[in-house]
């Protein structure tokens, strides 16, 4: 008797936009060039929020992460894409360190916009995570430009409203959910409030979020690849969870075949600090399941 075997192959689709952004690519280029040309090179805090890529930089280029400049006796220090407060540049220079500034230009835009609002006397709201290095850097730049600034780091609209500001100015950490900007912007326009709002969420973040949202609606499972310490990866996972069961992993070793039971189509996306080689490994591993 002829036996007919039907193989139910699982389809895997990668989001239209995902993975490394402009700022991360630029920071990696600057750091690896410095290591090749200038000798001992360090990053002030992890260059990006991806432990596997940080490990590769250490193995292949000898680039190490330090948390304080007093651990260093000369060499080059790379300021990561998230940026730092102004006093950190001075601290590095006073120790005789060569500084390579890899602060992403979109982060510089937020630092400047926030400082400008504070100088003009607005009550400043930074929508973001207070313990995130980018936000600490923005706060540092505002304080340096305007020591008397009234400044709050908030999670969203409710926390702004709780302070009943009269002259508010609102900026965003570059990797915040774009939906937060839209909601606050809508609220201001609807009530014709005399508040200033500047969309400082970067294009890469917005594209990655839109692409993840679009893909998650059409698949049975979503896999989000990126550092467990990466805020923008967590936000991608939160978007995907609205539409499909979602797994946030750092590497393919975390894939559990049984989790895909019954799935015909799987979507994959990755945070802005996830290198292409890890994404490829994950896609291949899912295809082999
Ligand atoms: Fe720059 Fe955006 Fe990448 Fe952050 S996520 S490094 S702001 S491009």
Image: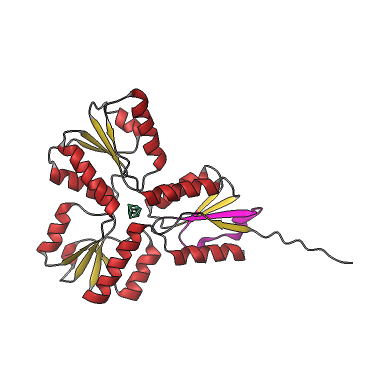
* Residue at left offset 64%, top offset 58%: 10
Percent across and percent down for residue 265 are 62, 54
* Residue at left offset 28%, top offset 48%: 131
Percent across and percent down for residue 216 are 54, 48
Query: 240 above or below 54?
Result: above
Q: Quadrant of the N terminus?
A: bottom right
State the residue lying farthest toward the left: 94
State the residue lying farthest toward the right: 1
User: Does residue 273 appear left or right of residue 2 in this picture?
Assistant: left
Query: 114 above or below 230?
Result: above
* Residue at left offset 29%, top offset 39%: 198
Query: 102 above or below 200?
Result: below
User: Does residue 138 appear left or right of residue 213 in this picture?
Assistant: left
Q: Quadrant of the C terminus?
A: bottom right
Q: Which residues are magenta?
A: 248-271
* Residue at left offset 23%, top offset 47%: 111
Percent across and percent down for residue 145 are 14, 44
Instruction: Count all numbered tags in the image, as a single digit.
Output: 0
Residue 39 shows up from this direction: no
Query: 203 above or below 123?
Result: below
Residue 179 falls within the magenta-colored stretch:
no
User: Does residue 15 appear left or right of residue 265 in this picture?
Assistant: left
Residue 213 shows up from this direction: yes
Q: Quadrant of residue 93?
A: bottom left
Q: Nearer the viewer, residue 100 or 59?
A: 100
Residue 254 falls within the magenta-colored stretch:
yes
Q: Quadrant of residue 147?
A: top left
Q: Nearer the viewer, residue 136 or 211?
A: 211
State the residue lying farthest toward the top: 191
Percent across and percent down for residue 65 are 27, 65
């Amino acid at each position: 008797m002829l036996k007919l075997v039907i193989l139910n192959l699982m389809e895997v689709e990668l989001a239209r936009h995902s993975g490394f952004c402009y700022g991360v690519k630029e920071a990696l280029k600057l750091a690896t060039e410095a290591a090749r040309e200038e000798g001992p090179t360090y990053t002030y805090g992890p260059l990006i929020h991806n432990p596997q890529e940080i490990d590769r930089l250490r193995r292949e280029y000898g680039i190490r992460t330090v948390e304080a400049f007093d651990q260093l006796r000369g060499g080059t220090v790379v300021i990561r894409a998230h940026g730092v407060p102004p006093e950190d540049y001075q601290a590095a220079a006073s120790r005789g360190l060569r500084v390579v500034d890899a602060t992403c230009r979109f982060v510089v835009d937020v630092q400047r916009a926030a400082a400008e609002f504070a100088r003009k006397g607005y009550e400043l709201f930074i929508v973001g995570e207070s313990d995130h290095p980018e936000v600490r850097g923005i706060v540092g730049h505002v304080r340096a430009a305007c020591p008397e600034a009234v400044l709050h780091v908030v999670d969203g609209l409710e926390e702004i409203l709780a302070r009943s500001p009269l002259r508010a100015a609102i900026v965003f950490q570059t990797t915040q959910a774009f939906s937060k900007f839209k909601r606050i912007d809508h609220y201001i326009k609807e009530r014709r409030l005399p508040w200033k709002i500047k969309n400082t969420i970067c294009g890469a973040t917005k594209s990655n979020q839109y692409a993840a949202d679009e893909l998650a609606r059409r698949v049975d499972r979503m896999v989000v690849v990126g550092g467990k310490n990466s805020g923008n990866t967590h936000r991608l996972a939160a978007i995907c969870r609205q539409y499909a069961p979602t797994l946030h992993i750092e590497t393919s070793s975390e894939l559990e075949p049984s989790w895909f039971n019954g799935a015909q189509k799987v979507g994959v996306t990755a945070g802005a600090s996830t290198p292409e080689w890890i994404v490829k490994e994950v896609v291949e591993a899912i295809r082999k399941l």
